[in-house]
Image (tube, helix red, strand yellow):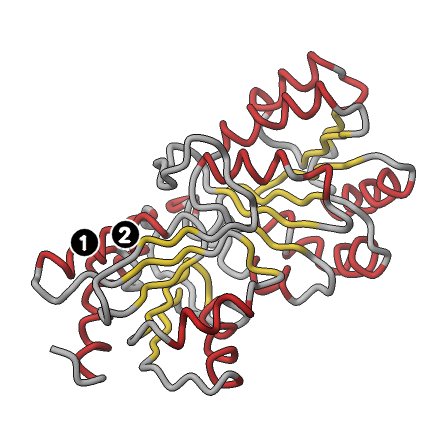
Amino acid sequence: MRDAFFDELLALFAADPRLMFLTGDLGYKLYDPLAAADPKRVVNFGIREAAMIGYAAGLAEAGFLPVAYSIVPFITLRCLEQIKLELCYNRRRVVLVGVGGGYAYGRNGVTHHGIEDLGLMRACGGMRVFAPCDPLEVRGIVRALPDLDGPAYIRLGRNKEPLLRPEAEPPSPYAPFYRPGDPGAGLLVTAGFLLAELLAAADALAARGAGRPAVLHLPCLSPLPEDSLAPLLAAAGPVLVAEEHIRPGGLGEALARLMLEAGIAAPFRSLAIPAAFPERCLDRGELLAAAGLDAAGGADAFAALAARSGRP
């Protein structure tokens, strides 16, 4: 995802002189091609992320399109007041890019885990929030940046995430991914690159003879496409939401509220990262397994939900 982002950003950088790239002291080789193309439009702020947000707001006011890039907790948690007031309150068109969402930084530990970001950014009024599932979706989001009318946040993995979308060309950043399942077998829902685990979970359930649930991924979490989601959820049967994020402010809470307000009484379960700190430094796969968010955990959780709802 990271390589796809910089590859697509370089093309946009060359085509649009308004684009400015700002970073908080990381990834030099990644943005070397940008600096080679136009060093005046690349600024390294060091570990002064809050100042970077203020500078980006000023650039946006002057007609530029700033892209501010750092590790997820450094670009969100560390700068939340500046994001709320300087970007959202003032409707500044600034693109925030967080690399290493969820447990992507694994053994780097809690300082680098990005597990609260989506809820925080969704809570900031007017912020568009994107959680792409694969490199192809990343390309589609970058291509759409000039059309934004306000601030946006993009959550990336680190790298080597597999291609999951079947399209040959990058899709719209607002277009959900949907893989149909067996009739009445239920629905697995996620956002971001956890999609790979849910696709595997659906396949595992089918291999058990339990029926293959449909799988839905939402690349844009704010605004959510509620009008199209409600009928899909109503017809789905059991609904399991899994997210590489803590439960507060996450997708599970958003869909539970939507279902309650729409009068949808389908069996529902939300899987999320526990709001607690890991006691050991583990890699992403181990952390997902411990949280029940890997393919095996998702399949087991959905099977239990289906059994609770009276399905075989």
Where residue 93 appears, x then y in whole percent? Answer: 78, 46
Name the residue rendered at 68%, 50% in the picture.
Answer: 152
- Whether the residues at callouts 2 and 1 have beta carbons within 8 Å, the answer is yes
Identify the mark at residue 203; answer none if there is no mark: 1
Residue identified by numbered label 2: 199
Residue occupying image coordinates x 74% and y 34%: 45
With 155 as the anchor, is 67 left or right in this view?
Answer: right
Task: Please give the name of the residue rendered at 38% of the width and 63% of the height, measured from the top-left corner.
Answer: 189
- The residue tagged with tag 2: helix, strand or loop? helix
Residue 205 position in % (x across, y down): 15, 61
Query: Relative to 255, does residue 220 appear above or below in the rendering?
Result: above
Helix, strand or loop at mark 1: helix
Type of amino acid at the residue the image marks with label 2: Leu
**Amino acid type, label 1:** Asp
Where does the image place residue 120, in percent across and percent down from the top left? 62, 63
How busy is the neighbourhood of tag 1: few (under 14 within 10 Å), some, or many (20 plus)? some
Between 266 and 192, the one lying in front of the other is 266
Instruction: Out of 294 and 147, give the one closest to the viewer.
Output: 147
Up/down of 27 relative to 211, above or below:
above
> As drawn, is 228 to the left or to the right of 309?
right
